[in-house]
Amino acid sequence: MSAPELTVVIVSDQGSAPVLPRLAELAALEAFPRFTVSLLVRSGDLDRDAVQAAAPWVTVIDTDGTPLTLEQAVATALPTVSTRFVMFTDAAIAGQGTIDRVIDRGHESVESFGLADAPFPLLTPIGWSERTITDAYRGWLDQQHADAVAARRADLDGYIHMLPLRNLLARLDGIDVLEGGTVLRITGMCRRGATDSVEPPDHGMELLVVDDAGTVVARADARPTPRIEAGLTRWTGFIADLQVDDLPFGKATLDIKLAAPPGREDVRVPVKPAPGALAASRPLVVRDRRFQFFPVHGSGRAEFVTQSATAALARMRWSATVLRRDLGGMLRRRPFAWTRPIRALTRPMFWRRTIWLVGERPDTARDNGYHLFAHLTRERPDVDVYYVIDRASAQYDQMSALGRVVAHSSLRHRLLMYHASVLVNAYSLTHMLPQQWSKALYVRHFAWRVGAFRVYLKHGIHMNPKVLKRQQTGFDLFLTASRRETEAARVTSGYDRQIVPTGLPRYDALVPTPPTRTILFMPTWRMYLVPRLFSDETTTKVPFEGSTYQRFMQDFLGSPRLRRLLEEHDYQLEFMPHYNMHAHLAQMPLTGDRLTVLDGSAPDIQDVMRRCDLFLTDHSSVHFDIAYLGTPLIYTHFDDDEYFGGHAHTSWFSHEEDGFGPVTRDVESTIDAIEHYVLNGCEREAEYSARVEETFIFHDRHNSQRAVAAIDDLIETRGIS
């Protein structure tokens, strides 16, 4: 048996327990004889016995139990390495092919840079390839192998420079037409290593436009932009501005090129479209050109098709181009290939109509979708709008009395999807899709054939805009209501001109009722306690029974002290579980008749909020509505570690520093805060009122009007700035 060629150093900052399953995965690989594994626990508990029992072949690197930084961990591990190559990771290796590829590519690079006789281990990337690790590796070499490094400095610098470029992935997230139609802005991602630095890495990126013959016909500098990935800021985004006049007529694809050291061949990688880019694709006419990008079946790539928009019969030529594409899809029986023929056959039914489809979840009408629809039917009868809702919903008849309603997933709904100019939803446009349609196939084969504008009303102010990414959602319009939310979304989401501060339509109805001596408790959900949404999964990451979430709910709602407080001061407490947690919490045992469980899917949620005198939540974004109303509120943070570890990242909005009420940590302090407000007549302190004034851009009842104006502008300009 040959000696191992690679040492995989697993660095854990959460102790040894989470690593044990990964060790078993590694031992199962056929490539195992080619590599060896070391474990370094830089923080957390190390259970040597458990590691040895699970994987006796693992070398545990001794740290004396002292917590280490990542740089210190790398410097501690490197002297223990005796193989040709070393890599650092905090995750399981993908599989047999990955290990073999890492080693084989490593040998190729070593030969290429003349480092075959280097007397030190050579770093090779996979999984982790952080700048921190690369810099720590350089520092260790300069300190421990100064003479050997000096003799090979140029070759070693070239080798290290190329490390981040050995595993590349480039993606197109969106296209914007700017500066009156003269500039095409390409927004995307180029994932590579060593991008976690304060300053952008010096990788010299260019966006290339490549024609059918493989010739580069246009190019533009690709400027690195920061992105949030797994809670870390990385310079993996890019923006490139192409002059529209430079776009050649015909077909073209996109590549990203990264500069190699002098004397080395530059690295190129194809740019593939993200789902959001495909969902938002439609024909655009700017200056003298008509263009659109289409998915290339089987390759994962997209191609730009550019034609003259002013030549004789230009529109007929474009129609012939897309017809040929459709005919190819029909012959191969691809999904939705008949979309445009169906549109053509049914167009007389919708001639010259600009149809808006508005909705929320399939069975609800109580949020921004409802309020926008109500405003349109009342104030804008000129808008051809339909509300999409399940016929079995309790709100179907109510919505029918307001205006035109279409039953979700009906034949009429599907037909309207072929002709809608605007899709508007408060949650996700996935909720607008007929049940008979696959989300993935809709994005890949339908959306770009119809080109409907995609509008995100939201269902509250986003505490964590990082989770809303342009590459996945492809919205043309994204409404906001808060100054800092708007700023955070522009920094983290990949959207820019699409973000328009209008206020949320439902805020128009936020008028408080007279006092009712009611306390409303509305906790949000936990994604790790429910099966994955939009899937057939039935299991959860963490069992609900015994979770911190379940224990708090049980202890708080069953508290004798809470019951006495409500009775002594003649208050009622209404408990409204989140829509996604209703199955777990609807039957939660309560103490006394002053506690009531409400249906989180009920249509009157806003009325419930308006009538409460005091509001209690953990992290629900509804607290912004309550603040807008002027009602005092309390935040109870009973499971912060689990919540931020498994559900949400740290937000731009801190309840402690920016919030509209006190923050509590357990059952007793929560009841203390409730008692405080009950005794002072449920009056909000001036400090919190000042924060409300600062947070919201608008403090009026014209939010729906501004939202409609933004949609009108989108239709009129076709999104061209």
Image (cartoon, rainbow, N blue to C red):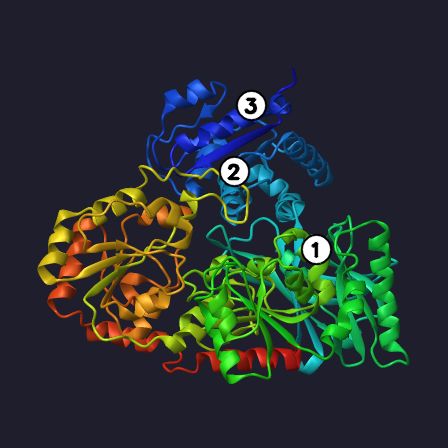
Q: Give the residue displayed 88% in from the left and 72% down from the top.
A: 317
**Residue 576 visible in the snapshot:** yes
Give whichever of 179, 587 is nearer the camera: 587
Residue 242: horizontal and vertical position, in percent? 72, 71
Residue 307: horizontal and vertical position, in percent? 84, 72
Amino acid residing under circle 1: Arg
Of labels 3 and 2, earlier in sequence is: 3
Dot 1: few (<14), some (14–19), or many (≥20) neighbours within 10 Å?
many
Res. 89 mark: 2
Res. 444 mark: 1
Q: Secondary structure at mark 3?
A: helix
Amino acid residing under circle 2: Thr
Residue furthest top as drawn: 1
Res. 27 mark: 3
42 up-or-down from 163: above or below: above
**Residue 80 visible in the snapshot:** no
- The answer to which image quadrant residue 578 occupies is bottom left
Amino acid residing under circle 3: Ala
Give whichever of 321, 690 is nearer the camera: 321
Between the C-alphas of marks 2 and 1, the distance is: 34 Å
Between the C-alphas of marks 3 and 2, the distance is: 16 Å
248 up-or-down from 60: above or below: below
Residue 348: horizontal and vertical position, in percent? 77, 74
Quadrant position of the C terminus in the picture: bottom right
Between the C-alphas of marks 3 and 1, the distance is: 38 Å
Of labels 3 and 1, earlier in sequence is: 3
Q: Nearer the viewer, mark 3 or mark 1?
A: 1
Whether residue 660 sits left or right of residue 89 in the image: it is left
Residue 75: horizontal and vertical position, in percent? 46, 38
- The answer to which image quadrant residue 454 occupies is bottom right
Whether residue 310 sits left or right of residue 194 in the image: it is right
